[in-house]
Image (cartoon, rainbow, N blue to C red):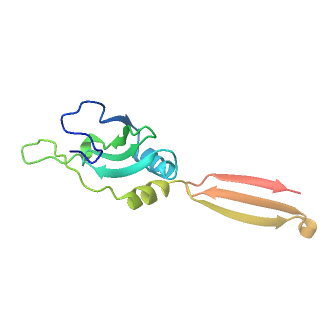
Amino acid sequence: MYSFGWPLSSAGLFHFAIILPDRKSLALTYLASRGGRVRYEGSADHLVSEALYLRDPENNGIEIYRDRPSKEWARDSEGHIMMDTFPLNLNSLVSEELNKGERHTQKHFLVGQGSDTFISESQTLKGQSNFTMKN
């Protein structure tokens, strides 16, 4: 018997799957799933993909996953793709992916006679600058 209370002989939808384009989307989906109408049930690292498992209000299973690039797939000595089920480190998923964004530095200057002009520079670590001037 499954933990859902259905006998092994029953037929029906186990879950449906939605593929996401990248790891950051998976991290954002995990954060969005917390506290919503969808019940978070778990996650898994399958070596070729990373997945979240949810249940909707009607108890339908939902798998939301992203495939790893094929060059990252583990292979055995004969070249066969290896798959398994390990716990997905959600703290790592969220912290690594959401901290990849551009970081900003800010500088503020008072210029002009009597320091009546304020210039603010916001600069990304990629070197792009945006200036705002207020009188």
| Left or right of 79 on screen, residue 23 | right
Q: Residue at x 83, y 62 (%)?
A: 118
- Location of the N terminus by quadrant is top left
- Location of residue 109 in the rendering, given as x and y in whole percent from the top left corner: 78, 66
Task: In the rendered view, tell whether residue 133 sits above or below residue 112.
Answer: above
98 or 4, nearer to the observer:
4
Q: Residue at x 71, y 58 (%)?
A: 121
- Location of residue 111 in the rendering, given as x and y in whole percent from the top left corner: 84, 65
| Left or right of 26 on screen, residue 117 | right
Specify the farthest residue to the left.
78
28 or 13, nearer to the observer:
13
115 or 61, nearer to the observer:
61
- Location of residue 39 in the rendering, given as x and y in whole percent from the top left corner: 44, 48
- Location of the C terminus by quadrant is bottom right
Q: Quadrant of residue 90?
A: bottom left
Q: Residue at x 68, y 57 (%)?
A: 122
79 or 45, nearer to the observer:
45
- Location of residue 54 in the rendering, given as x and y in whole percent from the top left corner: 39, 45
Specify the farthest residue to the top.
12
Task: In the rendered view, tell whether residue 20 sits above or below residue 104.
Answer: above
Specify the farthest residue to the right.
114
Q: Quadrant of residue 65?
A: top left
| Left or right of 124 on screen, residue 91 | left
Number of marks = 0
